[in-house]
């Protein structure tokens, strides 16, 4: 049975309460914790004010037994937990119920979430926003049931470190401490499990100290200092789970935020890619959900993904260099699709762009169609293709047996990006069938001085550039014409 709580303990400037108390951040002040470990029964943000809990050192630990609750009463105010180490009760998940859906009312956690015995998982419910900016390396599953969870830190690679452990000691010696961080998970053959993490680093003595209560055996071995991300260091076997009404957002409109390439994602909701710079997303994604390119930067989608929801390119550029062969890709206004990988089918909408390859290259569909919804006026080139200036090589959209389909609109223009050479035949699109004719197509931005025309064959669309005569040929032709005119004048004179 679920019993409603009616008794809460208010926070103070330096304390939160005890393991038997449910703490409410209603004390009218922010809280800074300096004790090595503080354990509370549960934690609630409920007042209409921005409140922050600061863990005063890298090793200051907050254990929340019953979960963290943010109510709608907080309104347009952020609730924040920063610094130190954050942990759920032993053997259970770290539970977060974020019910505040007001703009600006997100729950921000900048602490490192650490492993606990038989636990270390994160479970997020509620329609409100959760922003994670710490680096964690717990190995448990993340369950994102509702609302949006945003990761804003880049992932960190793991490292193998040689060192020595002593029986019944929490100190590892002879460790190169470069690149290690407090809260990083450690495994090794002399350790008794996977619930160890670093609580102290002494670079001068080349030692690290593990969390208290550990039992280790003696030996000189190679320790695995785990990789980390805002959502830990899970693998394909314990993938991040995105629920049908949940969103996982990579980045928050800035230049950082990513998962580990080894982390699997089962996406039954929305995975949103929202950065302003170039980065690569390669966490293998399955499920019935969608991926949305939302940021204005360039995202490279690497790896073989099997998710079946749509891929929506709403902004920036999505370079598919891997495979999303089970996903319909929809390119909307201000979005661009490129890369040298494989998508299922493509819908190109007004204001969107398809630009195959990474330079000159081929973008494939899985024998799927391209539905091209053109512009209603103007000369904007939705198909941006690069042409070689030295050969017949060019960008290619390979539809295989798919249909090259004329959708809505009246302007269907290729932008050749100022490239091309004279006298070449460029193959632009391979298809199984089409309802386009060459009269439907136009082009802009061919290399200076060039002209050309489209040629449509049974299963290809090509562009042929005209031959520009060599200067010497033009000169000889001019001299020949002048000589003929001179001879003619002489005959008339005679």
Image (spheres, rainbow, N blue to C red):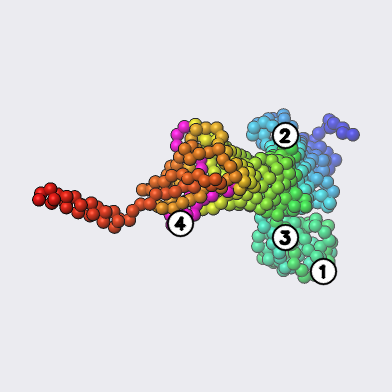
Q: CA distance from mark 2 to mark 4?
A: 55 Å
Classify 479 as above or below 38. Answer: below
The quarter of the displayed image where residue 477 is located: bottom left
Classify 10 Å Cα crowding around label 2: few (below 14), some (14-19), many (20 and above). some
**In the displayed structure image, the side of residue 283 where residue 331 appears, left or right:** left
Q: In this rendering, would 371 be left or right of 263?
A: left
Tag on residue 218? 1
Residue drawn at x 74%, y 62% is 224
Q: Residue at x 74, y 37 (%)?
A: 244
- Give the spatial CA distance, label 2 vs label 3: 35 Å
Query: Which comes sooner in the sequence, label 2 or label 3?
Result: 2
Indicate the position of residue 36 as horizontal and vertical percent values.
Answer: 76, 51
Quarter of the figure with the N terminus:
top right
Residue to which mark 2 is pinned: 127
Residue bearing mark 3: 225
Which one is earlier in the sequence, the residue at label 4 or at label 3?
3
Query: Residue at point 9% right, 50% down?
Result: 494
Viewer-nearest of discs 1 and 3: 3
Secondary structure of the residue carrying numbered label 4: loop
At which x and y percent is residue 482? Answer: 20, 52
The answer, for residue 250, to whether it is visible in the render is no
């Amino acid at each position: 049975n679920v019993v409603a709580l009616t008794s809460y303990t208010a926070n103070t400037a330096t304390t939160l309460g005890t393991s038997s108390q449910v703490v409410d951040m209603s004390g009218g002040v922010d809280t800074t914790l300096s004790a090595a470990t503080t354990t509370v029964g549960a934690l609630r943000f409920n007042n209409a004010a921005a409140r922050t809990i600061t863990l005063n050192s890298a090793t200051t630990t907050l254990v929340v037994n019953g979960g963290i609750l943010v109510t709608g009463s907080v309104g347009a105010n952020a609730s924040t937990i920063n610094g130190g180490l954050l942990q759920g009760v032993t053997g259970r998940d770290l539970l977060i119920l974020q019910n505040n859906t007001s703009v600006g009312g997100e729950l921000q956690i900048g602490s490192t979430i650490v492993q606990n015995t038989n636990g270390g998982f994160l479970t997020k419910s509620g329609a409100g926003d959760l922003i994670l900016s710490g680096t964690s390396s717990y190995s448990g599953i993340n369950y994102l049931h509702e609302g949006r969870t945003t990761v804003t830190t880049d992932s960190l690679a793991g490292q193998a470190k040689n060192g020595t452990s002593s029986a019944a000691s929490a100190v590892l010696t002879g460790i190169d401490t470069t690149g290690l961080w407090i809260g990083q998970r450690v495994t090794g053959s002399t350790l008794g499990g996977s619930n160890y993490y670093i609580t102290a680093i002494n670079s001068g003595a080349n030692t690290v100290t593990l969390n208290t209560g550990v039992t280790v055996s003696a030996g000189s071995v190679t320790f695995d200092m785990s990789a980390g991300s805002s959502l830990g260091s899970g693998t394909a076997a314990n993938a991040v789970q995105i629920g049908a009404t949940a969103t996982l957002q990579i980045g928050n409109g800035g230049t950082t935020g990513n998962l580990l390439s080894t982390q699997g994602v089962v996406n039954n909701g929305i995975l949103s890619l929202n950065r302003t710079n170039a980065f690569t997303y390669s966490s293998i994604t399955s499920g019935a959900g969608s991926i949305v390119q939302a940021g204005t930067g360039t995202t490279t989608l690497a790896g073989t993904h099997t998710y079946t929801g749509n891929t929506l390119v709403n902004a920036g550029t999505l370079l598919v260099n891997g495979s999303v062969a089970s996903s319909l890709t929809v390119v909307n206004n201000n979005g661009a699709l490129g890369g040298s990988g494989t998508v299922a089918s493509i819908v190109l909408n007004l204001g969107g762009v398809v630009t195959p390859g990474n330079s000159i290259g081929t973008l494939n569909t899985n024998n799927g169609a391209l539905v091209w919804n053109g512009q209603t006026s103007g000369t904007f080139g939705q198909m941006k293709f690069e042409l070689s200036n030295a050969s017949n090589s060019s960008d290619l959209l390979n539809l295989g047996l798919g249909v090259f389909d004329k959708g809505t609109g009246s302007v269907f223009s290729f932008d050749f990006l100022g490239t091309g050479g004279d006298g070449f035949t460029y193959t632009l699109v391979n298809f199984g069938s089409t309802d386009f004719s060459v009269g439907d197509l136009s082009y802009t931005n061919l290399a200076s001085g060039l002209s050309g025309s489209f040629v449509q064959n049974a299963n290809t669309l090509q562009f042929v550039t005209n031959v520009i005569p060599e200067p010497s040929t033009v000169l000889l032709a001019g001299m020949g014409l002048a000589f003929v005119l001179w001879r003619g004048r002489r005959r008339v004179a005679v």
